[in-house]
Amino acid sequence: MAELLKVENLKTQFNTEGGVVKAVDGISYHIDEQEIIGLVGESGCGKSVSQLSVMQLISTPGEIVGGEVIFEGQDLLKYKAHGSEMRSIRGAKIAIIFQEPMTSLNPVLTINQQLTEMLELHLKMSKKAARERAIELLSMVGIPSAKSRIDDYPHQFSGGMRQRVMIAMALSCSPKIIIADEPTTAVDVTTQAQLLELMKDMVERFKTSLVIVTHNLGVVARYAQRIYIMYAGRIVEEGTTKDIFGKPRHPYTIGLLKCIPRLDEEEGRKLVPIEGLPPNLINMPPTCAFLPRCSYKVGRCFQESWPPLKHLHGQHYISCYANTEERTSEPAAR
Ligand SMILES: Nc1ncnc2c1ncn2[C@@H]1O[C@H](COP(=O)(O)OP(=O)(O)OP(=O)(O)O)[C@@H](O)[C@H]1O
Ligand SMILES: [Mg+2]
């Protein structure tokens, strides 16, 4: 499939009183047409900021300081954040589903008002046609009695149902890409699984690409074709889902996999958390940011700057100096 979006060396920072927070520090990734990718990393590693940067939704003290976001041959970062070009992209061509639907749904407007606004604005539908389409979309995402529920307010829906409404809203203009930023963190695990299945079905039906942003590798395992692992504002490993789960090579990825339960492994395997905390993104050391938490570190890690992404094979890349391949079974003692 053809490449749809290509992000090159994207850098976004927050100029705070305490210093410059390098939230996204030169990430590159791409997504093909009708592809599902996962963007995975611990809280605070820059996942949301990177996606908001793609949509130019960064406000002061944040600033996009470098990079390119090539979508359909155009660099979106050349457009003004509040200009008409970006307005015609947001929602219509690239839609985003946020972490907590209550913060993105307007509590004083009915679902109908919120869903039809997009259809009227971007697709120039009449009020009546937009309402009919909105009901159809709500039924598609599994809202029972959509015809009457459409006039309800967001608080009249459960958390899972609100997330379904958000999915309907994201799909409404048949965008090319949907970015789902932790779409299931606020719901229970059963609802989480249902919502992920729904999203997978919907993107297949609408022929949309999907970026699943999550701190949980387990969430993307079933859905993503490729995975990007982020740490401290950078991508430290990327590969197909098979590469990441079958042959993880970055110590951070190896650590992430040790924290999740696996059905395909021996019984009695202990879940091991990654010790230590992510670094402060102000005044980052020039060396690899994972170094203080790494069980695989070698002499070179202390002397050289953050390792550039190294090609392993196929679509598999890592940013690491250590030879983790020989030692993936048993990390060295600290
Ligand atoms: N408005 C802001 N001012 C200062 N720093 C900010 C601001 N917004 C985000 N940051 C910082 O940018 C970094 C990246 O934040 P981001 O929200 O992208 O993390 P995340 O990976 O999405 O985390 P989570 O999993 O918790 O959603 C964090 O260190 C955060 O503190
Ligand atoms: Mg986030």
Image (spheres, grey):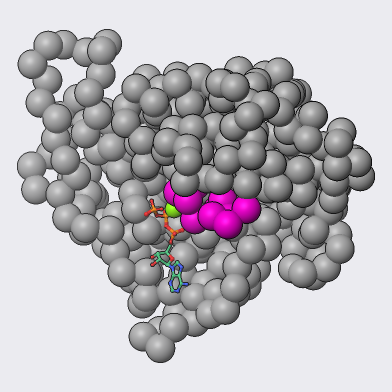
Question: In the picture shown, does residue 232 fall above or below 181?
Answer: below
Which of the two residues, 52 or 255, is positioned nearer the viewer here?
Answer: 52
Question: In the picture shown, does residue 81 fall above or below 202?
Answer: below
Q: In which quarter of the image is the N terminus?
A: top right
Which x, y percent locates residue 66?
A: 65, 68
Tell me, yes or no, if residue 251 can be seen here.
Answer: yes
Q: Give residue 20's quadrant in the image.
A: bottom left
Which x, y percent locates residue 199?
A: 57, 26
Q: Give residue 152's quadrant in the image.
A: top right
Q: Magenta part of the protein: which range?
A: 99-109
Residue 316 lies left or right of residue 30; in this view the side is left
Tell me, yes or no, if residue 313 can be seen here.
Answer: no
Which x, y percent locates residue 254?
A: 28, 34
The residue located at (68%, 62%) in the rendering is 56
Which of the two residues, 176 or 189, is positioned nearer the viewer here?
Answer: 189
Which of the two residues, 247 or 134, is positioned nearer the viewer here?
Answer: 134
Magenta stretch containing residue 48, yes or no? no
Question: In the picture shown, does residue 106 fall above or below 158?
Answer: below
Q: How many labels does the image show?
A: 0
Most prominent secondary structure in the magenta stretch?
Answer: loop
Magenta stretch containing residue 108, yes or no? yes
The residue located at (12%, 11%) in the rendering is 267
Which x, y percent locates residue 99?
A: 46, 47
Question: In the picture shown, does residue 281 fall above or below 149?
Answer: below
Which of the two residues, 191 or 86, is positioned nearer the viewer here?
Answer: 191
The residue located at (85%, 50%) in the rendering is 121
Q: Residue furthest bottom?
A: 17
The residue located at (63%, 47%) in the rendering is 110
